[in-house]
Amino acid sequence: MSDPVLKVKDFTVEFWVDGVWYPAARNMNFELEAGKVLAIVGESGSGKSTTALGLMSLLASNAKMSGSIEVKGKEMLGAAAKTLQKYRGREVAYIFQEPMTALNPVYTIGFQIVETLRNHFEMGPKEAHERAVELIRMVDIPDPEKSINKYPHQLSGGQRQRAMIAQALACDPGLLIADEPTTALDVTVQAEILDLMRGLKDKLKSAILLITHDMGVVADMADEILVMKDGLTVEHGSADQIFNRPQHPYTQELLGAVPKLGSSTKRVLEILDKQPVLKLENVTIEYPKRGRIPAFVAVKNFNLEIYRGEIVGLVGESGSGKTTVGRAAIGLLPIKEGKIEVVGKDISHATNKELFAIRRHTGIVFQDPASSLNPRLPIGESIGEPIFLAGLAKGAELAHKVEDLLDQVELPRSYRNRYPHELSGGQRQRVGIARALALTPDLLIADEPTSALDVSVQARFLDLLQELQGKLNFACLFISHDLAVVDILAHRIAVMQNGELVEVGDRDQILQNASNAYTRRLISAVPVPDPAEQRIRREARLAAKN
Amino acid sequence: MKFSLRNKSKGAEILQQGDILNKETEGLSQSQIVIQRFFRHKAAMIALAVLLIIIIFVFSVFDMQFLFFHYHGWWKYTISDMPDLAFKECPNNTVGCPTLNLRPHFLGGSGLRFGDHPFGQDDVGHDYFALVIRGAQRSLLVTVIIGLVGGTIGTVIGAISGFYRGWIDAVLMRFTDFIITIPTIIIGAVIGAHFGNLGVSFLALYLGLFAWTGLSRLVRGEFLTLREREFVDAARVAGATNRRIIFKHILPNAVGVIIVSVTLLMSGAILLETALSYLGFGVVAPDVSLGLLISRYQDAFSTRPWLFWYPGFFIVTIALCINFVGDGLRDAFDPRQRRKISRKERNVTLKLRARND
């Protein structure tokens, strides 16, 4: 057994907030050997990112760290700034979650890689440039000689993450800390990045500390897993142990909450009302040209019908136009060609007045609950606004209706005077549903409502949505990038790629034997929270690629 | 809810609920909550009280005619009276020194005394108290008018161009650029030369018509970012009209920026008036303003410093109070602002925490 690259003992991080020390991570103990992957999993606020940043001594000035961090036998906690500067990037490299913000937009990726190299090695510019090209080739960015002179905004999301990995690997670090490296990426790109990281780890023999909330990613990568909750280590064991024989109830709960593709039972819906609630016919949506930027066709020839009581999942990767479809369906975006009908009324070229009438029949739940609620309005007012504007109720009657809605989404009535920032993400999204359902709409558009939520919160949210849908029987267009979530909810699934509808069909038909190659690729790229099954899927995917 | 520290159970509530200041059951409208929060802001409340006292004091001094209501002021002199110069008690052979004394006997002074000329007299014998109070009245008037006129125009123009964008924005912003290129002091000079005889409120009104540019730029920027937020779409889906979206949803979110820059505009207005008066374009004699007083007696600084103390005191106090009130308003409008826990409350939470551990 070789010496561990990283040895963490009794590591504790505390933050000084308003005169009180708040522990963010307590008594962390773990070791990591070369060539191994340790995954720290946990929900938001569990302290996993704090731990990772603490290892690099990159925490804010109100943090206090204690314990011991040894990197290759050298104590790093409390080391001088100069020592730390030397070891950052050289011994330990960091891959951030969002490559767009972690890369400096005014420098080329080549410049940034060369900078890292020349900070740590005595190296001429030419030599460093050659090494940078080599690194870019290693992370499979096409045409390395040209790509080296590109700016971050000229690369795609996946390529940017690759560039960041290249920068992290520049000095051959013994330890790579990856903080949610694929969270901002699409599933197919995520699968490629994970493949790349796995390959490089084997080739370079470095250890990886993977921070993530995604159990699928963990199953795909990790040898060892450490589960965190509220700053405490809940469970620590091998991947096999954690996934197959979880001991701690929290781990079990966490694994239980993860939506698993193909796990829910068959669902059949008999359509009684033959009149569709939402009907899109040959819809084309174009973002008009602005200045020198040419017009962009976001959606082409789109056809879809949704009936009463039905949930249709609309899936696709980022930029596929799914959100655009959702917004157009409730008249937030004008369409260029085609026809949109909501409850039998044509809204393709409706005036504001006509739209106002339609809005009584529609509701929308937005992606980001933090941005979709007015921070200056108490949530009671946000929920009551549609009712008030429709002229249905006022004063005490309105207050009563707001209370009913809060009851429906299982929030305490006293919350109506709270502001959005006083609520947690899951609670805010419940407020979003309550507002969308305020007018008991016939059509609900849910635009990635769970993508900002933790899995356990997501599970509760999906239960609630399903329950409400069963009770109120509205038609729902559920937009998501997460096939597993759509699998839980939807009766039918529509798949979009580059603004076009690729395939639409019953849930089971799409998930089990999709006819379209893109759909199949999308499904195979979804990581499954089961190491053994994920290995089989991975090999199948790689075999299909070669 | 009210924090009471007498019993421990209330302390436990502090621990759990932190800064929540809502009555739990009753629905409160946004304005009620804002007012509640403003009243909790100590510095702002003190500043508001001082400002109100100054305003009431300043406007109670002289006679006033308001429609059919005639008010008798309590001060014997007006700005045009010229009593004899007093020189008996003055140090260093000066004349017209202040008779106001705030130092009581037991501190070695000559007792609280207002006297004949509390702020002294100027070189020809005008009562300086009357002059300063009159000047403070003018300054307050200028401040309020410029703040109201400039604030309203700036907010409306900024809001409209930020919200509607497109050609409306282009036209309004080019117009703003045009106004910005003309130095305010020149505008003031031209206005002063043409309308100076119409009185100080007209001067302030015209200055307000040109003082909104910076504010409108800021408001426009704020609107441009806010209109892209999803809650605006959510309001639109709920059936809100453009007017409702602007005033109910976006404006309250931009109010912090607006209030801070309006208060800066207002305290800047005092200085603008001072500068104009100094140049001779602002308030015209026989009327006075604080700026005019300072510039008129600039030669006397070393011999008769009280000629600066009193107008200076009013300028600084008024400007400071306005800034503090603005601060308090901004905090009140921002629900994310947390009330700081006082030391007493913190000790309770710490003790409880120690016990729980």
Image (tube, rainbow, N blue to C red):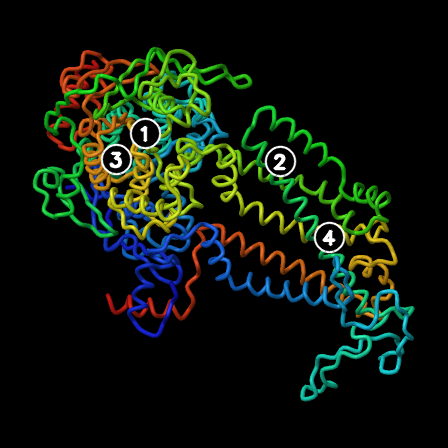
Q: Quadrant of the N terminus of chain B?
A: bottom left
**Whole-percent x and y of residue B269?**
71, 51
Residue type at tag 2? Ile
Disc 2 versus disc 4: distance between alpha carbons? 22 Å
- Verify CB contact (< 8 Å) between mark 4 and mark 1: no
Residue type at tag 3? Ser
Residue type at tag 4? Val
Residue at numbered disc 3: A206
- Front residue of this view, candidates B172 and A71: B172
Disc 3 versus disc 4: distance between alpha carbons? 71 Å
Q: Earlier in the sequence, mark 2 or mark 4?
A: 4
Q: Quadrant of residue A475?
A: top left
Look at discs 4 and 1 and give the one toward the viewer: 4
**Whole-percent x and y of residue A238?**
13, 41
User: Label 1 crowding class (10 Å Cα cut-off): few <14, some 14-19, many 20+?
Assistant: many
- Circle on res. A43: none
Residue at numbered disc 4: B142
- Front residue of this view, candidates A215 and A360: A360
Residue at numbered disc 2: B157
